[in-house]
Amino acid sequence: MTTPAEESQPGPVPVSDPRPGDKRAAIAAEQAHLDRVHDRVEHLRRRAEERAAEAAADRSGATFQARYERDVTAHHHASRQQRYTFGDVESLAFGRLDLADGDDLHVGRVSVIDDDGDVLLVDWRAPAAAAFYQATAARPIGVARRRTLVTRGRRLVDLDDEVLDGTAAERLGLRAVTGQGALLAALSRERSGRMRDIVATIQGEQDRIIRAPATGTLVVSGGPGTGKTVVALHRVAYLLYRDRERFEGRGVLVIGPSAAFTEYTARVLPALGEDRAVQRPLAGLAPRGATIRGWDEPDVARTKGDLAMAEVVRHSLHAVLPPIPPTTRLSFEGTTLTVRGEHLEALRERHLDRIRADVPGGAYHDRTEVVAQALDDALWAAWARAHRAAGGRVPEDREGSGFAATLDAAPEVVLLRRCFWPERDPQEILGMLARGEVDLTEVGRGLLAAEELAAVVAAWQRADDWTTDDVALLDELDALLGEPPSKRPRTTPRQDQDDGGIRLATEALHVEAPVVDVESHAYRDFAHVVVDEAQDLSPMQWRAVSRRGPYASWTVVGDLAQRSRVSEPATWEEVAALIGRRAVEITTLEVNYRTPEEIAAVATDVLAAAGHDPALAPRAVRATGERPRQVVDGDPVAATAAVVTELLASRGGTLGVLADAHDLPALARGLQDHLDEDGRDRTRVLEVRESKGLEFDDVVVVAPERIMQRSVVGTHQLYVAVTRATRTLTLVTTGEVELPGSRHCVQVEVTAGRP
């Protein structure tokens, strides 16, 4: 975050105007260097590809150790190949530093060294490259001139210089070759369907966050357009670079609010040369096979997200198991025994009380063998008492007595075992609660109000699928149940393919380390977890997310002004407590790089209407000269179709059409006939909440008055909607309604089907 003292410092030091031809000569020289970098990277990529293929094809090793070393080698070269594969659309080099001591270095996506040991390119994450982002005229930190390169694949199209130390620049004979500012050029560029990295235009306050140590919980707070998400992703790339063994070995998890968001951001890390982070939407934490769609109304979401639901879910295990038969008869060695069901029910309840989520061996299915043994022990003890009472002698060796075989053959015992501790599935249990087969209000008695639980059941019965708010409940059940024995992979002893021969003592002592598969849905030990749009997670959802990184460091990204829920947590300190961390460092980004000033004025009014201090709105850094429009029409679908047709025909880029969930079906049908193939590729029609974290060149918000009235957080949702645009904003209203921000809009009426 830039301090007032830094803002008052002078800008880059001016140097005499460049001589004619300076820029052409500079571009030619930089293009020659860029060609060397690309040629070298292509050579390294081909060499890694060849060596990976050679290692994969090697079948000479017969022992496990040889095969393991072969696979490690193949993986190493495949990773290097991936690290040097960028395609033609990514800029490998994007900057140059001319240092005050006369040295210079180029900054790019990866470090590149030629065969002679000369450094052609320094990785942007390396300490030597930090000055590219951190140097200022007030604090040049040894930099005389900073040059930003604007490239398209292998071609250099522009460059821009900042002289930061005029005295050093004059001594070295350096001049400033001006061009369009790299940051403003990047901000003005049309969007695609995917988020771009900002590695060439990272600002100083963003760089400090990216390079912050991963020692606890770092909160990156900021309003829309401040770059929170992309900064967090660059931080992941930096952490992987700085401590690859720690973060790549145990993995990095990035949680986003929706599948649309995860798809939008999926390209950033691979473009930075990192493909080892796992990116999942919040819905992706649900057990496999669960269909997740949409969100609940705020009051229902608040109940489902209450931490008391963890205990409600736990209590449900007692209610969903089948009843134990009233009596179970058993005959052994002439003594017939009848065991009453209530005695066995008490035994089962004791073991249910011992279930612990997130404790090794504490889950329901983990205790299957223990419980089966306890049941057999109870039957043996009951039979032994009855046999002694009948004057019989109890065998001292139970295992050799044949008792176990008798149990296996007794039909009533077989039935008892099936009922006593059967395999269960999270969706099966939650489904029983949703359908009313198990009374949720009874299960949750004393934990939550009966009317709140009844509202949850009513919401379940109206829905066709689980919602994002159900994910935490399914995950809690999944953690309580553990993996069923029938689904666990069978383990077989490893058999090396050698012929015996001489065996080294170290081989006899060899212990295979388990292979860490961070992509596995069941993996629970990530080294670092990033949570985006964190202000929307309920306490139960935080419980589910924190389960993935019990010993992790955290990057939490969000904006409390964009909350889509009315429940806790309401502060970042409360979030840190839910994660299980006492200390939290909160950083704030205050500059809006996305939204033009004209749209930012509308957003500030909406922010104030949502009950927040308008002074907290991030500061926009550019203007387009194009005011937002408010289109008034009694038929919002037809008006939206007209606006969309006009925007697609008049300009390129992406278009977002945002509406309340209830308006989406009619809107999608109405637009279908107005979009050709190109229009469908460029246009996304989304519920407002699905648009969180996304951005579009042009945005059309349909019936914003209905979005505001939809719920207690409706105005917050409208704030999200109006801040998605990088170029133009159009509000389509059903009448001449006074909306927050209307005073900054041009009022337009639709005539002859066109605005």
Image (cartoon, helix red, strand yellow):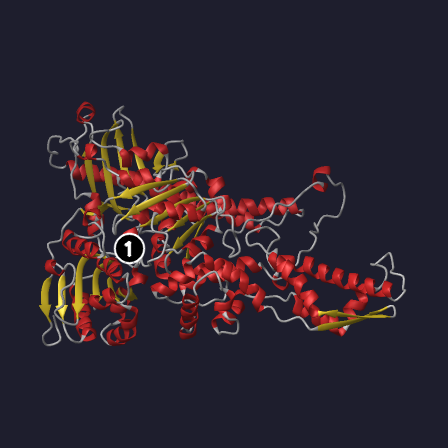
Query: What percent of the width, then of the height, locates residue 290?
Result: 47, 66
- Please name the residue that numbered disc 1 is placed on: 562
Residue depicted at 43% across the width and 56% down the height: 541
Q: Nearer the viewer, residue 150 or 234?
A: 234
Q: Secondary structure at mark 1?
A: helix
Would residue 489 be seen by someone viewing this image from the given angle?
A: no
Above or below, comparing residue 24 to residue 338 in the picture: above
Relative horizontal placement of residue 445, taking residue 322 as reference (left or right): left
Say which quadrant the C terminus sits in.
bottom left
The picture quadrant where one finds residue 584 is top left
Relative horizontal placement of residue 439, taking residue 27 as reference (left or right): right
Query: What percent of the width, then of the height, locates residue 174?
Result: 19, 29
Would residue 509 be seen by someone viewing this image from the given angle?
A: yes
Q: Nearer the viewer, residue 741 or 455?
A: 455
Say which quadrant the N terminus sits in.
top left
Query: What percent of the width, then of the height, locates residue 364?
Result: 60, 59
Relative horizontal placement of residue 546, taking residue 740 as reference (left or right): right
